[in-house]
Amino acid sequence: MSAPTITVTRADAEDFLYQEAMLLDEWHLDAWLALFEEGGTFEVPTTDYKGWDRTGGGFFVLDDWDLLNARVKRLKSRKAHAENPHSRTHRMVSNVRLIQGAEGIEIKANFVINRFRDLTHHTYVGRYHHDVVQNEEGELKFVHRRAYLEHELLEHGARLSFIL
Amino acid sequence: MTQTMAEGLVDTGHGGLIAQDWNQLTFRVNREAYRSAEVFQAERERIWNHNWLYLGHETEIPNKNDYKVRTLGGKPLIFVRGGDGVVRAFLNSCPHRGTVVCREEQGNARNFQCFYHAWTFNSSGKLSALPGDDAYAELERFKGTMDLRPVAKLDIHEGFVFVSFDPDVPPLLEHLGEAADVLSMAAEQSASGMTTLPGIQRYGVKGNWKLAVENAMDGYHFAPTHNTFVGYLRETGFPVTDDDQYAHDLGGGHSMLVLTGHNGRLGMIWEPRFGEAEKERTRLNREAMAERLGQERADAIGDASRILFVFPNLLFFDLEALTIRQLEPVAPGRTDVRAWQYVPVDEEPDVRAMRLKTMTSFVGPGGLATPDDIEAYEAVQRGIEASKGDTRGFNDWSDMSRGMERESKGEKGRSIDEGAMRSFWRHWDKALGKVSDATATEYGSGC
C-alpha cells in the first residue's frame, strides 16, 4: 500500500464512485473488480447492524478476495439463475465525503439503487463506507468496500443477487 | 378421500389437494395449495394456530429484561426474558384497547408502557401502572385481568424456544419427536455451548412458504440450481457429490436430509477452503468431542451434514457451519424469512471469521447460492399462474413422484428423490383437512 498522499480531492472520489456506478449498471464486472486492490474485501451487514466486525454478527455479504472473485465469476455465468436475465439497475450516488487521515483514505457516500426485474421494481437505499488507497498511477482502489442498507428488512423480492 | 381413475384408486388425501397413486407410483400436489387465499387462511387457522411454532433462541435475549418483537402466524409478539430470568412470549397488544405495546424492534426494558393511555407492564407481563385507576370498580380484581396476554404455551428444547397459540397441543418433546435429537446434536457441538449471534438476515420472498420447505428438502435441485456454487467449491479443491445421501421422514411432518457428500464442516470435517491451520484444529476438536461425548455420539454429530425441517416453520442447517431459518407466511405468494448464525460460544476469532464468511458465502439473499433458490420459489409462484383453472389432466398439478418406486419397496429414500417433500405434504394435508369444495379440485378429470 502506498503512503497516504494529499493529492486526492473530493472530486476524485466522486469520479471514482460515478465510474464504479456506471460499470455496475452496465454489468462490466471484470472492470469493476479491477477497481479493487488485490486482497480487497466487500461487506454488506444485515439491516439490524450495530457495528460488529467480521467475527461478531450477521452479514448478507462477507466476501474476502477469493469470494469476491467467485462472485464476479458467478455473475458472469449464464448459470447464475438469480441474475439471468440480469437485473436492470440505476444508481444514484451523492453526499460524497473524503476523509484522509493517518489510517489512510476513506470515502463515504449515500446511494439509491433502483432495480428492475420480473416487471417489479425495488429501491435500495443506504450508505457506502470504503477504505481506499491511491496506487502509483494515482488511481484509487478499494481495500474494503462496504455498503450499509438503511432498510429495516429486505422486502419481498428484494434480494441482493446483484452487486449493491 | 379417493377418486376412481382408469388406472385405479388414487388417494387424494383429506382435502383433495394432494394425490398419490400407488399403482402408477405418482405423487402430485394441486397448485391451488400455493396460490389460494382460502388455503392460506385455512393454514393460518388450522396449522399456525394449533401447532408448536419456532419463536426464537433463548440466546437472543441473554440478559434479564432483554426483548425482541417478532411476528408469528401474523400475530405480533414480544419475546422477553423477565426480571426473574424467565423466558416468556406475550401478544404485543395492549389488553386495554389493543394498541401495539412495544414499538421498538429490540432492546432491554424493565417496563413496557403503552403510549396510548400509559398503561405499564413489567417485563414479566404484570400490569404495574394504571393511570387514573380510581375510575375502575373492584380495582384489584380488574387489574388482575389486565396483564399482558401470554401465548398459550411456551417451551424450550436446547435453547430453541417454541410457542403455541393452542393450549391443548401435545408436549413439545412429543411434537418434536425424532427432530429433538437432531437439535441436540447441534447444541452439543461445543463444550462451551452454542449461541445465536446478533445480525439477523431478514428478507422476504415472493413465493409460498411451502416452496421454501420443498426447496430445503430437495437434494435434486442442488446440482442444476447451484451450478455456479458447485463450480466455486470445485475450484477451491472441494468437489461435492450427491451420491449415497439419504432423506429421512422423522414423523409429524418433520424431515431431514443427511448430506455426507457435502462434508466440509468447520471443526468437524476439514476441506481445503478452511485453510491448513484448520486441519490440525479440526483433529484436536474431534478428539475433544469424542472424549466429552463418547466416540459414537461424537461421530454421529460430526460425520455428516444435515438439513432439518421442523413442521411448520423451522429450517435448521448444520452444514459447513450452522444456521437457523424461520418461515413466516404473510400471503399465499409472500413469505418473510429470518435467519440466524448459530455458533460455538467460545471460538477463536479467526475460526469465527472463517465460519461467518463460509456460511454467508452460501446462505442468505446476498450469498452465492440462496439467491438462486429464491429465484426458484419466485419463478414457480409466477409459473403456476399459467395452469390456474386448467382442468385438463394433471396440468394444474406439480409432480413429486421422484423415488416413489423405491419408497413403495420400502427402500431408503435418497436426498435426490422427493420423499422428504412427500412426507411433508402428507402431514400438511392431514393437518389442514378439507378447505372447501372449491379447493378440493377433482383429480385428473381429463384423463
Image (cartoon, coloured by chain):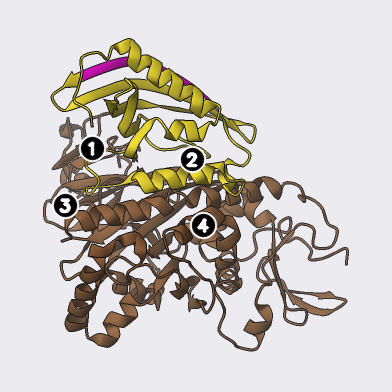
Few, some or many residues within 10 Å of mark 2 (<14, 14–19, 20+)? many
Q: Which residue is mark 3?
A: B82
Mark 3 → mark 1, Cα distance in angstroms:
24 Å
Residue occupied by mark 4: B231
Q: Are marks 2 and 3 on the same chain?
A: no
Kind of residue sitting beneath label 2: Arg
Chain for colour brown: B
Task: Indicate whether B202 appears above or below B132.
Answer: below
Label 4 to label 1, Cα distance in Å? 34 Å
Q: Are marks 4 and 1 in contact (CB under 8 Å)?
A: no
**Amino acid type at image mark 4:** Gly
User: Which quarter of the picture shows residue B165?
Assistant: bottom left
* Element on which disc 1 rests: loop
2 or 1: tag closer to the N-terminus: 1
Chain yellow in the figure, letter: A
Left or right relative to B298: residue B313: right
Q: Estimate the spatial distance between the alpha carbons at disc 2 and disc 1, rounded to whole Å.
A: 21 Å
Which residue extends farthest front? A136
Q: Chain of mark 4?
A: B
Q: Chain of mark 2?
A: A
The image shows residue A56, relative to residue B233, as above or below, that is above
Query: In this figure, which residue is indicated by the disc labeled 2?
Result: A159
